[in-house]
């Protein structure tokens, strides 16, 4: 991976993510049994946002307004608790004072629950602990005579056309790679060639087969050496290619053929030695891709970055190796892992278990740290404005204030993040519901949102 200083390019501006079109992992209400999204509300223009600090030596500012009286919180939680009793589902939650780490309120906070996509907070925590956030993922075309090979450092957000410098998705475009390579090949007198591509650099399953029985297998693509649009088969959020790297090679071959170099595909292989580099394109930075993953809640990119972190840490780049690395990273950072059980890094598995305390511990450790990890809380989407929080909390004091990672499965709804009170006190929260009957978790989202809004109003 190549290093690059990126400074404020990974700040918290909500306009520069290139998020359009991909909000898949929380399914945008598309999982069978989900209710429709909340009705859109007209809102005023957003306020000025605090900028995340530089990636190198960063430290998040934790505001220290008037401390919150813990006695004020149980009445705010009571409506959610009552709804859980009446609806016969389980509610859980915790609120932590960010400056001190004191637990202000908890309900089943140390019990492990099905987390859904709030798992991705732990994935990002681990990735930022082992990967250089200012690095980019390179994709290159190599050549030895008329034998070509396309290799990548694991970029799943390649673009099919020209590189788009203003977008995270498609920052590295295959058309640019083909154009530069075609010039070099033509100059060398090569008019026909063969093309191979990188085989998977990872170990074991490329998708969790356990998801087939859970009927969620189609909401995640395989980890791979490279892919367009995280391996999606089309513009839908459901359905992924079984071999996304081949699709990249095929598109590159077509581009080269159109530029006068007839190309025949061969197959996947390890990156060959002794080949010359004809052309290279570079992804958005790792920090930008991780923030894109958290905003869109993309399952495949989450799994990919878990494997990349595992590879960097020197452990087996498999599901078990990656999830084991999450546990070890959290423990080393002083984060509670009581009850933690992970089958994957995206939270798509219904067998995953995380406690609310683990989520808030991770966010507080990140916010209190220095370096890249400090920006993790600011990587979360903003309430009512972007990512999977676009249609959440669009009224009240949490709007354009709270930042949170959403989690949604048919019987699970969860939310974890940060919110500032009216006096400027920063609170860290994790709340959720599981075992919701009739796959009706979407109906619980407004209850979670209202609780967070009530925290903002303190």
Image: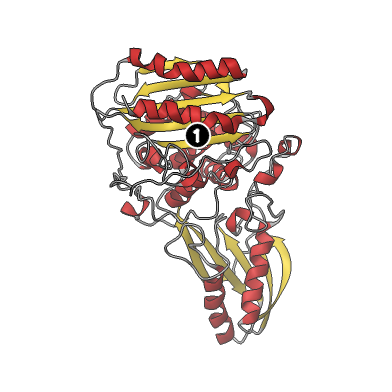
Residue furthest to the right in view is 213
Q: Residue 176 in the image: state x and y as whole percent.
A: 52, 72
396 or 274, which lies in front? 396
Is 143 on the left-hand or right-hand side of 12? Answer: right
Tell me which residue sits at (68%, 68%) in the image: 250
| Residue at the spot of label 1 | 122
245 or 312, which lies in front? 245
- The vertical placement of 203 against 440, above or below, is below
- Which color scheme does this rendered protein use? secondary structure
Residue 402 visible in the current orientation = yes
Q: Residue 7 in the image: state x and y as whole percent.
A: 32, 53
Tell me which residue sits at (52%, 15%) in the image: 82
Find numbered disc 1 in the image and state the secondary structure of the residue it sits on: helix
Is 375 on the left-hand or right-hand side of 335? Answer: left
Callout 1: 10 Å neighbours few (<14), some, many (20+)?
Answer: many
Is 61 on the left-hand or right-hand side of 187? Answer: left
Q: Residue 121 in the image: state x and y as whole percent.
A: 48, 36
- The vertical placement of 333 against 4, above or below, is above
Residue 332 visible in the current orientation = no
Residue furthest to the top in view is 71
Tell me which residue sits at (61%, 19%) in the image: 87
Q: How many labels does the image show?
A: 1
Q: Quadrant of the C terminus?
A: top left
- The vertical placement of 166 against 144, above or below, is above
Q: Quadrant of residue 407?
A: top right
17 or 42, which lies in front? 42
Q: Residue 437 in the image: state x and y as whole percent.
A: 66, 24
Q: Quadrant of residue 332?
A: top left
């Amino acid at each position: 991976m190549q290093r690059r200083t990126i400074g404020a390019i990974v700040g918290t501006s909500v306009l520069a993510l290139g998020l359009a079109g991909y909000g898949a992992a929380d399914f945008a209400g598309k999982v069978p049994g989900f209710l429709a999204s909340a009705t859109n509300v007209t809102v005023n223009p957003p306020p000025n946002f605090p900028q995340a600090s530089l990636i190198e030596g960063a430290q998040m500012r934790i505001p220290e307004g008037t401390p919150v009286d813990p006695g004020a919180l149980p009445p705010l939680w009571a409506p959610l608790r009552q709804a859980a009793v009446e609806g016969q589902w389980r509610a859980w939650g915790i609120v932590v004072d960010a400056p001190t780490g004191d637990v202000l309120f908890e309900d089943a906070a140390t019990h492990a629950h099905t987390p859904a996509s709030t798992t991705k907070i732990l994935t990002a925590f681990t990735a930022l602990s082992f990967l250089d956030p200012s690095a980019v993922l390179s994709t290159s075309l190599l050549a030895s005579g008329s034998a070509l090979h396309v290799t990548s450092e694991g970029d799943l957000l390649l673009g099919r056309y020209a590189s788009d410098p203003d977008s995270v998705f498609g920052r590295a475009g295959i058309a640019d790679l083909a154009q530069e390579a075609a010039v070099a090949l033509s100059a060398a007198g090569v008019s026909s060639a063969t093309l191979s591509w990188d085989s998977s650099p990872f170990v074991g399953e490329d998708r969790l087969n356990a998801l087939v029985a859970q009927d969620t297998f189609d909401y995640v693509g395989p980890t791979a050496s490279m892919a367009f649009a995280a391996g999606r088969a089309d513009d839908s959020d459901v359905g992924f290619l079984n071999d996304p790297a081949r699709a990249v090679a095929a598109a590159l071959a077509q581009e080269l053929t159109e530029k006068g170099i007839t190309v025949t595909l061969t197959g996947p292989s390890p990156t060959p030695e002794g080949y010359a580099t004809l052309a290279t394109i570079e992804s958005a930075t790792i920090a930008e891709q991780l923030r894109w993953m958290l905003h869109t809640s993309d399952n495949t990119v989450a799994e990919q970055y878990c494997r990349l972190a595992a590879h960097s840490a020197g452990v087996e780049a498999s599901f078990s190796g990656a999830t084991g690395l999450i546990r070890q990273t959290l423990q080393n950072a002083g984060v509670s892992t009581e009850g933690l059980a992970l089958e994957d890094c995206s939270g798509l598995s219904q067998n995953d278990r995380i406690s609310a305390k683990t989520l808030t511990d991770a966010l507080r450790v990140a916010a209190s740290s220095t370096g890249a990890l400090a920006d993790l809380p600011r990587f979360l989407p903003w309430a009512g404005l972007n990512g999977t929080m676009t249609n959440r909390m669009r009224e009240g004091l949490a709007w354009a204030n709270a930042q949170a990672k959403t989690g949604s499965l048919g019987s699970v709804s969860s939310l974890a993040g940060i919110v500032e009170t009216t006096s400027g006190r920063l609170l860290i929260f994790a709340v959720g519901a599981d075992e919701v009957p009739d796959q009706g978790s979407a109906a619980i989202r407004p209850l979670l949102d209202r609780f967070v809004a009530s925290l903002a109003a303190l």
